[in-house]
């Protein structure tokens, strides 16, 4: 989850401009599990235990982790807004 949240911050800061770059970079650069498709795809396809899928489900789980393990898991307002608007990372 931390690597995925850091990837979202890279989008927010303009370091990454496409989901493809984020996915390839996260797999090849930081060792994100390849079977997930990469960090951006993982966040956009995240499914929680209630069967909800997408960034909203990812943000909700990150909030749960933040409550249990600290603010390093807390999503940024930018990611919250993207999830709330049913947005996605640019292709």
Image (spheres, rainbow, N blue to C red):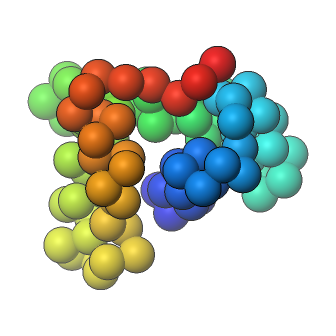
Q: Residue at x 77, y 57 (%)?
A: 30
Asked if one can make out residue 34 in the rendered structure from this viewpoint, the answer is no
Q: Is 68 on the left or on the right of 33, as rendered?
A: left
Vertical placement of residue 74 versus 42, above or below: below
From the top left corner, tell me how far across and down residue 79 is, in percent: 37, 47
Q: Position of residue 22 (x, y in %)?
A: 70, 39
User: Taking 34 as reference, is 53 above or below it?
Assistant: above
**Foreground residue, 85 or 26?**
85
Taking depth in this image into account, of 51 and 62 the one nearest to the observer is: 62
Q: Residue furthest right?
A: 28
Residue 51 appears in which quarter of the rendering?
top left
Q: Position of residue 39 (x, y in %)?
A: 60, 41
Residue 36, relative to residue 6: is it above or below? above
Give the x, y percent position of residue 50.
Answer: 13, 30
Residue visible at 46% across and 36% down?
43
> At x 22% / y 33%, what residue is drawn?
84
The residue depicted at 31 percent of the width and 77 percent of the height is: 71
State how many labels appear: 0
Quadrant of the rendered image containing residue 37: top right
Q: Residue furthest front?
A: 14
Q: Quadrant of the C terminus?
A: top right
Q: Is residue 1 left or right of residue 49?
A: right
Instruction: Name the residue at the bottom extreme.
Output: 70
Q: Residue furthest left?
A: 50
Above or below 31: residue 20: above
68 horizontally vs 58: left or right: left
Query: Is residue 29 among what the camera can see?
Result: yes
Q: Nearer the viewer, residue 79 or 51?
A: 79
């Amino acid at each position: 989850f931390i690597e995925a949240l850091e990837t979202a911050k890279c989008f927010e800061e303009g370091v990454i401009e496409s989901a493809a770059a984020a996915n390839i970079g996260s797999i090849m650069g930081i060792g994100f599990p390849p079977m997930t498709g990469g960090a951006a795809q993982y966040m956009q396809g995240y499914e929680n235990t209630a069967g909800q899928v997408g960034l909203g489900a990812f943000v909700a789980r990150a909030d749960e982790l933040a409550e249990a393990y600290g603010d390093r898991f807390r999503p940024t307002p930018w990611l919250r807004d993207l999830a709330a608007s049913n947005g996605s990372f640019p292709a």
